[in-house]
Amino acid sequence: MDTTILLFLLQDGITNGAIYALLGLGLVLVFAVTRIILIPQGEFVTFGALTYAALAVGQVPGTARLGVVLGLVALAFDLFAARNNLTARAVARSAAVYAVLPFAILGIANAVASPQNPAALNFLLSLIIVAPIGLYLYRIAFQPIAHASVLVLLIASVGVHLALQGLGLVFFGPEGLRGPPISETAVTLGTLRFTGQSLGIYATTLTLIVALWLFFGRTLYGKALRATAVNRLGARLVGIRTSLSGQLAVLLAAVIGAVSGILIVPVTTIYYDTGFLIGLKGFVAAIIGGLISYPLTALAAVLVGIVEAFSSFYASNYKEVIVFTLLLPVLVLRSLAAPAVEEEKD
Amino acid sequence: MAQRLPIVLFALVMAVLPFVPGIPPFWIVLLDNIGLAALVAMGLVILTGVGGLTSFGQAAFCGFGAYTTAILTTSYGLSPWLSLPAALVVSGIAAVVLGLMTVRLSGHYLPLGTIAWGISLFYLFSKLELTGRNDGISSIPPLAIGTFEMRNPNTIYFAIWLAVVVAALITVNLLDSRMGRAIRALRRGHIAAESFGVQTAQAKLLVFIYAAVLAGLSGWLYAHFQRAVNPTPFGPQAGIEYLFVAVLGGAGYVWGAVLGAGIVTVLKEILQSYLPLLFKNETQFEIVVFGVLLVALLQLAPNGLWPRLLALLPLTPRGQQPQPAAALPAREIDTASTGPLLTIDKARKQFGGVLAVNDVSFEVGRREIVALIGPNGAGKSTTFNLVTGVLTTTSGRVSILGQDTTDTPPQQVVRLGVARTFQHVKLVPDMTVLENVAIGAHLRGHAGAIASMLRLDRADEAKLLAEAARQIARVGLTDQMHQLAGSLSLGQQRIVEIARALCADPVLLLLDEPAAGLRHKEKQQLAELLRQLRDGGMSVLLVEHDMGFVMNLAQRIVVLDFGTKIAEGTPETIRTNPDVIRAYLGGTA
C-alpha cells in the first residue's frame, strides 16, 4: 500500500469518525442525564439530512407536519398529567411549547421554502424543524417512564426508533437523497484535498466536544443535569426540575443528530434507514467511552471511522461485520473493569 | 399433575383445530407463524423475563438453526431429521461462544452487546458464500415421515405445534426445579443465591444456551416450512420483534410467549392488509404502529398482557403442600477436633480512602452465640461480607474449621457450613416463601437442568421442599409458606432468611440484624430458637443493635468502632467497659 492510499483512507476515516464522534457525544449526553440509550439518535440524522435535502429542492418535508402532530400529542400528555392541578400559567406554557411553536415552524417552512434558498437558510430551517421533534418525543415516550430501569428505557427507545424509521420511509420514500454542500471551497495540502464540507465537519465536532465538556464539567447547570442521572429523587429534592433536564438533553441530541445529518448529506446518499447504522457506529464509540467520557468517545469515534475505512478497502464485504464485532471485546473489557454488583429493583 | 392440565388441554385444542370444518387455510398459515415466533419468545421469557438478561439478538440464533439445516440438506443431502440435532448443536455452540463473551456484561451493556452481534451476524449471513449471500438458499427439502411429506402449512402445523407444546412443558418443568429457582433468583437475588452455592455465571450461561436452542429449533422448522432461507428474517429488526413479542405477552410467563406471538402475528397481518387502504402506497407503515404500540405498552402494561388475563380468571393459585420425603443427610461434623469454628486474624478491608475493617481478630467457638456490636458504620456488615466471601480482604486471614478461606468465593464458603442472612433482606420477591427457603438447600440437592426438564428430579426435589417446609415450620411461618416473599412484613422476611440459612444445614449461622423490625414477643421467640440451635450444636454470630436482646442471648460480645475492635468479653464486662460506653455515648460519658 502506498502512502497516498494510506493518507486517503486515514482522511476518510477521520471525516466519518468525526461524524460518529458527534453522534457518540449526543448519546453520552442523553445517557448521562436521563439514562436513556437513545437508539433513535440515528433517525435524527436521517431527518436532518433528508429535511435539508428536501428543502434544497423547495419542498416542505413531512417532518414539519410530524412536529405539529407530536406537539399536539405531547400537549395532550401534559394537560392529562396536570389535570388535577391546571393553572392558566401552566396551560399557556404547555400550549406555547407544544402547539404554537410547531405550527409556527410549519408556517415559516411553508412560507419560506423555495428552490432558490441559500444553503445556510435551509440549514437553519432544517434544524428548527427537527429539533423540537426530540423535545416532544421525550415528553411522550420517555417522561412517563422516566423512573424505570435502564432496560425498560432501552426497549422504549427501540420502539421510538422503529416508529421514526417507518415515518422516515413514509416522508421521504425508499430512494436516497443528496443535498447541496454548504460551502464549495476546498484546500489542497500535498496530495490531500480537504473540501469545505469536511473542514466544517471537523470544526463542528471540535467545537461541540469542547462546549459539552465545559458545560457539564464547569457550569452549575451542567452539573445539575448530571445529578439528575445519578439520583433523580435527590436532584428533585435540591430543586432540579428533572423532566425539564430530560427534555433539554434529548433536544440537544436531536440538534446534534440533525447537524450531523446535514453535514454528511452532501457527501453520501442518505436513505430512510441510513441513520440507524450511522447512529450505531456512534454508539460503538460512546460505549468505548463508557457512556461517560466526552473526549474518550471522540477518540474512539475516530478509531471506529479509521477501522471502517480500512476494512472497506481490504474487505469491503465485511465492513459492518468488523465494525460491530469490534464492540464485543470492548464491552467485555468495560464490564470487567467495572464489575458493578447491581440487582434489579422494581 | 394439576399444573400440567392446562398444557394437555391446550395441546388437545391445537391438535383438533385444523380439522374444524370451514377453518380458512390462511388461519393455519398464521398459526404456523405464531408457533414459530412463540418458540423464540419462550426462550426470551426464560432469558429476559425470568433471568433478567435482555437480548435483542435472538433472531441470529434462528439463523444458525435455519442455515445449518439448509446447508446440510441441500449441499450434503442429509435428512432433515439428522440435521435437527446439528441445527440445535450449532445454535447451542454459537450461544456458548457469544454467551461466554456477553453474559458477563453487567446491566445495560448486555443488551447493547446483543444488538452488536445481532447486526454483525446478519451481515455475515448476507455476505458469506456458504450461506448464499443475500439470495440465501432455496429448494430445501420438506420434512417427511416415510413417504408422508409435510409440504403444506396444514401438515407442518403439527410439527410446529408439537415443538411448542413440548418446549412449554420442558420450560415449565425447568422453572419448577432446583435449577429453576437458581435461574429465577438471577434477576433480583443473585447475591443471596451465590451465598447458598448457586453458580450464577453458569446459570446465566445455561439460560442463554437454552434460549438459543429454542430459537435454533424455530429456525430449523422455519427453513423446512418456507423451504428457503435468506438473511432478512434473521436481522436486527426481527430480533427486536421477538423481544416485543415476549414483553407484550408478559416477559415472566411461559404462556405469555404464545399469547404475545399470537397477538403480534395477527396484528402484523391486519396491519399489512388494512394499513395500505388507510395510507395509500405506504409499504412499511406497520413498523410505525409497532413502535408506537411498544412504547404505549411499556407505559400502560409494563408486565405484559398475560398476568392481566390471569387476573380476569377466577383462579386462586394454591400452593401444593410438599410431599413427605426422606430427610436430607445431615452434614458430617468432625466432633473430635476442638479448635475454633471461625477464626478471623487481622482482617482488613479498605475502600479507597476508607478503612472499613482495621485488623480485626476474633474467634467463634463451637456451640457458642457471639454478638458483634458497634455503632453504625463500625464495619460489622463488612466483616460478615469478608467471612462469607462476598467481599475480598485487603489483608489478613479468615479460616473456618481450621481451613483457610480467605477470599474464597461465597459458593465455597457455604459448602463448609457457614450460612448467613442479610442486613438488607435479599429474597426473591416474586417467589413463594417455600421456594425462597428451598434455595438455601441448593447444595444439598443434585438434580441438573436436563433432569429437571425431563422431570427426573422429583425424588431429589421432594426432599429439598420437605426440608424447606421443615425449616419454615421451625421458625413458625408455616401459614405463610405459599405467600409471595415480597408480600410479607419486613420482620417476617428476616425470619424467612433465617429459615433459608437453616436449610443449608450450617455449623455456623451468621445473622445480620435478625431482630430489626420484630415485635417484643417475636424477639423472645427468636432468642429461644437461637438457644435451641446452639444446644443442638450450632454456633451463631450475630450483628444486632437491640442491646437487651444481645445481652440476654450472647455468651460473648465483640465490639467494633470505626473498623477497629475495641473490646471483647462477656456481656457483663462489656456493659461496664469504659471504651464501649465512650464509643456509644461519646467522649464525655
Image (cartoon, coloured by chain):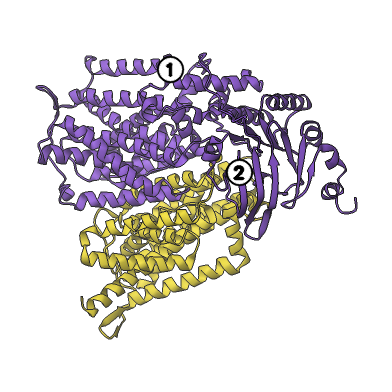
Chain colours: A yellow, B purple
Q: Secondary structure at mark 2?
A: strand
* Within-10-Å neighbours for mark 2: few <14, some 14–19, many 20+: some
Residue A232: image location, x then y, percent: 60, 50
The amino acid pointed to by label 1 is: Gln
Asked if one can make out residue A32 in the rendered structure from this viewpoint, the answer is yes
At 81% from the left and 38% from the top, the residue drawn is B570
Q: Name the one closer to the observer, B398 or B147.
A: B398
Please name the residue that numbered disc 1 is placed on. Answer: B3
Does residue B118 sit above or below B43 in this rendering? below
At 21% from the left and 78% from the top, the residue drawn is A2
Position of B224 with respect to B239 (left or right) is left
Q: Quadrant of the N terminus of chain B?
A: top left
For the residues carrying marks 1 and 2, which lies nearer the camera in this image? 2
Q: Are marks 1 and 2 in contact (CB under 8 Å)?
A: no
The amino acid pointed to by label 2 is: Ser
At 29% from the left and 69% from the top, the residue drawn is A266
Chain letter for mark 1 = B
Distance CA(mark 1)–CA(mark 2): 46 Å
- Farthest residue in the bottom direction? A190
Please name the residue that numbered disc 2 is placed on. Answer: B399
- Farthest residue in the front direction? B336
Chain letter for mark 2 = B
